[in-house]
Structures are given as structure tokens and as C-alpha cells.
Image (cartoon, grey):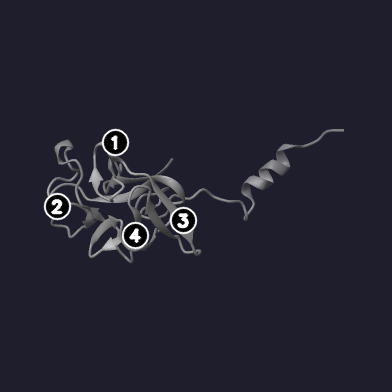
Amino acid sequence: MRFNILGPLLGLAISPWSTVAQDFSGRGQIRALHVRENHQDLGCLTSAGKWTTIETLCGDFDAQRVGNNNEFRLSSTGAGSCGIEGVFFKCGISVGIFGTWGTEGPVRGREVIRYGAYGLMASDGNNPPEVRDVAVGIHFSTGKERGKAVWLGWKAL
């Protein structure tokens, strides 16, 4: 008598109710991904929600999915709830609900942060920040900032 083990295992892997891993779920870092086609990693956000290129300053974030529409809440291990204040990404303020365009959005295969209809981010001055800048505020891009605009992506920890 022969048993076919592969058949049932494959059935589980492709079943419609199988769970697909999502970005912005659980614990991770928020990474600044250049808008160009190679989406070069240009640093991370600190626990306060500022952009830095100093890896030791990268913050730890917790993302909790809400609803079924690619929406989630973010909190920083060091500063508390994250949201948008005016046009700036900040932590330690009231809770904001972020979303993504899913993995078919601007960075294929990865989710990136959107808030309402917007998601392209930049900073005033150097983009990305230089090491001497330590960390700089990041806000929705107006298209007039010098340097590189970024999408905010996720790196699970």
C-alpha cells in the first residue's frame, strides 16, 4: 500500500483559507525605500518616527491589523502610538489608522504605508539624512524637496 503524502500537503499550501504573511503585522522596523525601480533601502525610522541612516537608531514598531481593508495601527516601542500630525509622520501622538495598497502597489511584492490617498514621503534638507543629521522629520512629499522621496516599507523582526 502506497501513501501519497505530497497531495494533502500541497492542498493545504494552496487552499483559499491559508494564511498569507503580511507586512505591517506584528513587530518590525519601518524602512525608507527609494521610489525608483530598485527601491534601494535608504535607512529607517526611529522610535519617534524620524528618518535616520544610523542602523543602531532604528526603532521597533508593533503593527496591529484592523478590518479587512489592509488597514493597521502602529505603535513604537519607545514612544507609543504613531499617526500623522499635519503632514508629518510622528510617534507619541494620538492613534492613526494607516493602510497599504497591498502587494500590488507601488513596490511590487511589498506593502508600503499610505494614509488616505497618500504615501510618498520626504524630508526637508538631505534625503536621505546624512549621519551627522542623526534623524530628521519625515512628511508627505510635495515634490519640491531636495534629494530622494521614499515609500515607507516594513522589515519584520
Residue lying farthest to the top in this orientation: 1
Give the vertical position of 50 relative to 118 (above or below).
Answer: above
Q: Looking at the picture, which amino acid does disc 4 mark?
A: Arg
Task: Give the mark, 2 or 3, whose residue is nearer the N terminus.
Answer: 3
In three-dimensional space, the C-alpha distance between marks 4 and 2, rounded to whole angstroms, equals 20 Å
| Label 4: few (<14), some (14–19) or many (≥20) C-alpha neighbours in 10 Å | many
Determine which residue is flagged by label 2.
124
Determine which residue is flagged by label 3.
64
In three-dimensional space, the C-alpha distance between marks 1 and 3, rounded to whole angstroms, equals 24 Å
Determine which residue is flagged by label 4.
114
Image coordinates for residue 80, horizontal then vertical, percent: 35, 54
Task: Give the mark, 4 or 2, whose residue is nearer the N terminus.
Answer: 4
Between 11 and 95, the one nearer to me in the picture: 95
Between 31 and 45, the one nearer to me in the picture: 45
In three-dimensional space, the C-alpha distance between marks 2 and 3, rounded to whole angstroms, equals 30 Å
Residue shown at 27%/56% (left/top)?
90
Res 55 label: 1
Quarter that holds the N terminus: top right
Task: Give the mark, 1 or 2, whose residue is nearer the N terminus.
Answer: 1
Image coordinates for residue 50, horizontal then vertical, percent: 24, 49
| Label 1: few (<14), some (14–19) or many (≥20) C-alpha neighbours in 10 Å | few
Place residue 104 in its image quadrant: bottom left
Image coordinates for residue 76, horizontal then vertical, percent: 36, 50
Local SS, label 2: loop
